Image (cartoon, helix red, strand yellow):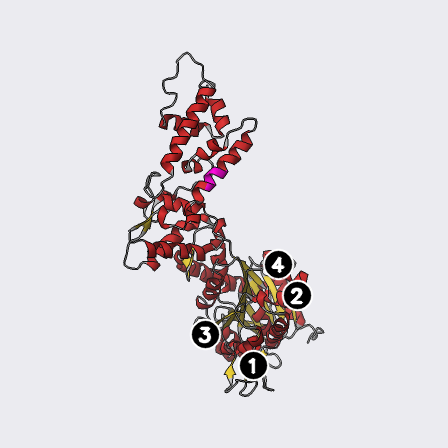
Amino acid sequence: MNDSKNEPIAERSTDAADADLRLRLLIVDDEQTIRRLCITVGESLGFHCLEAESGDAALALLEEQPVHMVLTDMVMPRMSGIEFLEQVKRIYPRIEVAVMTGHGSVETAVQAMKLGAYDYIAKPFSPLDELRLFLRRMADKIRLVEENLYLRERSETETSLHGIIGNSAGIQNVLRLISRLKDTRTPVLISGESGTGKELVARALHFRGTMANRPFVAVDCGSLVPTLIESELFGYEKGAFTGALRSKQGLLQSADTGTIFLDEVGELPLEMQAKILRFLQEKEVRPVGSNQKIKVDVRIMAATNRDLDAEYKKGTFRKDLFFRLNVVTISLPPLRERRSDIPILSAFFLDRLAPGRVVTVSGNAMRALLAYDWPGNVRELENCLERAIALSDQAVIGLNDLPPAIANAEKQTARSAVREQKARAGGHRVSDIQANALVPSDLEDAGLHTDTRNHDIRNNDLQSSDAESGDPDTTDLEEIERATIKRVFSQVKGDKARAGKMLGISRATLYRKLKRYNIGTHQNPTQPSTLQ
């Protein structure tokens, strides 16, 4: 036996970041020498190794840590290897389990394989290379299975997952994390601004994994009445308080064997945070007015739009609860940081909001959507498109169909970009009229215009002219712009370099606008050009 009974679980890793990328091997044996030997071999193969001295300790560890493969002894106190194997395959069917036996017969090993064990290996390991080869073959199988699963789900995870839409790097990283965590019971903290889709991530983690057929209970912590939070979460007995005419099961108990999702967990008062922490530690609830405790087995997920790290440092959120929830964090990017997803999100919402109709977005309207900052994130985009569909019976959503703040976003962005260019040029001042005269077509040259034709929404709708009837200001702006460029060009006597600097625009933009407005095309051939 071993001399570390007071330390049932120990983790052998010095680099948690690297460990996330390696296969994770859990060794379960009541003999410390066997565990240390297996750890040595496992780490030599590049595995991240964990150990437990009993089946109970191993099951407790599996609730907190994702594991790919388990190597367990057959004969252990309190819980046998066969009992442990049955528990693991019932709760975590994707985990590969191999058994070690130095006591049982071949019949016992065969029984283990019928219950789902990968294979068995006899102790003592002689030679040691036998164990190394055994673990390597086991790892090869796991990698092959994971690769096949990845290829099978790739088409789904590239564009959408349970309503999560996008091709941007930020969303693809979220989808990859969901794929890795959906079959575990690891606590997950989902952070992000309001409207980024935190509950969608929680639902994807639950319904795309092995717990899909079990309860999923979402609790909006911010909407619970403070005086009723405890009775809502933990339930109550008949007569526990005035109006309690019958017993009621709490939300935590209703999620038994499934997932409880605490949305906006940062809104919970400190007193209730302490009770939630105790529930997570003890895995049991006591309804209001009852002396009986009820065992509850749930996976915990939480979401917040607050910085809980800063909150606990200020004392407004419990530090111990924060670390209990923050085992794995999934951070959702705001929509302004994933503008490239706006066209595909728009197509998705239009198909859902206008079933049976073909509704598209015009070029000018799409440029406005791309230029807007979206403080309400994806939810605001959906509401914007729902408004446009409700107010218009046309097949194409134009600039006039968008809320004024969004419709004007493109022009404001263009003017800001031009002012920045003017400031960078230095030494030459342009009047506000000149700066404001530069119309939205300059977004492209300012590096802020996204060519929506590259997005597969409906190409013919994104090639609309900038002179679309929905933009009544464009013609007036172009006239002001033409007069301004002509006046500046005349002042510098045709010097294109000086004209570009004074106007705060690039040479390419200046050439295009000179040609567009037919300015300087009959320049005196004897006049030198400063651009040669």
Residue occupying image coordinates x 52% and y 62% = 139
Q: Is residue 96 rendered to the left or right of residue 125?
A: left
Callout 1: helix, strand or loop? strand
Indicate whether 272 appears above or below 444. Answer: below
Q: CA distance from mark 3 to mark 2?
A: 30 Å
Q: Earlier in the sequence, mark 4 or mark 2?
A: 4
Q: Quadrant of the N terminus?
A: bottom right
Give, as a single range, the part of the protein colored magenta.
412-416
Q: Indicate the amino acid at tag 2.
A: Lys
Q: Indicate the amino acid at tag 4.
A: Ala
Q: Indicate the amino acid at tag 3.
A: Arg
Residue, disc 1: 295
Q: CA distance from mark 3 to mark 1?
A: 17 Å
Indicate whether 406 appears above or below 70. Answer: above
Label placed on residue 319 = 2
Residue, disc 3: 214
Q: Nearer the viewer, residue 335 or 174?
A: 335
Residue, disc 4: 16
Q: Earlier in the sequence, mark 3 or mark 2?
A: 3
Q: Indicate the amino acid at tag 1.
A: Lys
Callout 2: helix, strand or loop? helix
Q: CA distance from mark 4 to mark 2?
A: 21 Å
- Name the front one of labels 3 and 2: 2
